[in-house]
Amino acid sequence: MEESLKQALPIERKHWELIDWFYRLPADHRIFTVTYRRQTLRAVVQNLRTELQKVRSARLAIKLDGFLDPRESETLRTGWTAQLRSAAHAEFPDLILPQRYEMVPPDIQKRIAKRIAMNEAGWTQQRIIACKIEFPHVPESEFVSPFERLPWHVQEQIKYRVLENERQQPVKSDSSCKI
């Protein structure tokens, strides 16, 4: 195994990231419809050079670029997906996010996950604020239920409040625009 490793090294960072990405995927990822992971570390090391080509070909077969794009690479290094970052900023606008997602305290991670579930259920920040104004007795835990499943008149009341809130926001004028 040591000899195989010596022959395969050195290897570029982007190649390591690609192999690392492949071996961290969940078992139900669609890439496994076109290829499989090696079952032992020995097999990976012995086939390191061909493993890279196999992963790149499999990515192309499922319509992914051959190498990781910058977002995938960033996610691999930090654990922060675009969705996690967006939800964290929405939930905690003044919080400076740690470099790695795993450094976020568990209670904050739960709130970020809750924010993602709310967004996936159709609850934008504007709708949440509007609902809190229109229906102050409704607990926030209800915001994970799909917005579209609310009674029509409730949806309309929330949408109306969103529009009213937007109208009340001061319009930013560009003072550099002179007539």
Image (cartoon, rainbow, N blue to C red):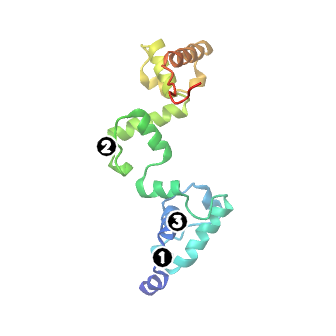
Task: Check the picture and name the quadrant holding the C terminus.
Answer: top right
Task: Measure the alpha-carbon separation of dots 1 and 3.
Answer: 11 Å
Check whether the beta carbons of the residues at disc 1 and disc 3 lie within 8 A of each other.
no
Residue at the limit of the structure toward the bottom, as seen here: 3
Look at 49% across and 19% down and name the residue there. 169
Residue that label 1 marks: 11
- Relative to 23, is 95 on the left or the right? left
User: Residue 55, image x and y in percent?
Assistant: 59, 67
Nearer the observer: mark 1 or 2; the answer is 1
Place residue 113 in its image quadrant: top left
Place residue 140 in its image quadrant: top left
Task: Measure the alpha-carbon separation of dots 3 and 2.
Answer: 28 Å
Task: Check the picture and name the quadrant holding the N terminus.
Answer: bottom left
The disc, 1 or 3, on the residue closer to the chain's N-terminal end is 1
- Which element type, helix, strand or loop, lies under badge 1? loop
Look at 63% across and 65% down and name the residue there. 58
The disc, 3 or 2, on the residue closer to the chain's N-terminal end is 3
- Relative to 4, is 63 on the left or the right? right
User: Residue 39, image x and y in percent?
Assistant: 51, 70
Residue that label 2 marks: 105
Check whether the beta carbons of the residues at disc 1 and disc 2 lie within 8 A of each other.
no
Image: 76 above or below 94: below
Name the residue type under label 3.
Answer: Leu
Name the residue type under label 1.
Answer: Ile
Name the residue type under label 2.
Answer: Pro
Residue 135 seen anywhere in this rendered image of the structure: no
- Which element type, helix, strand or loop, lies under badge 3? helix
Which label was assigned to residue 18? Answer: 3
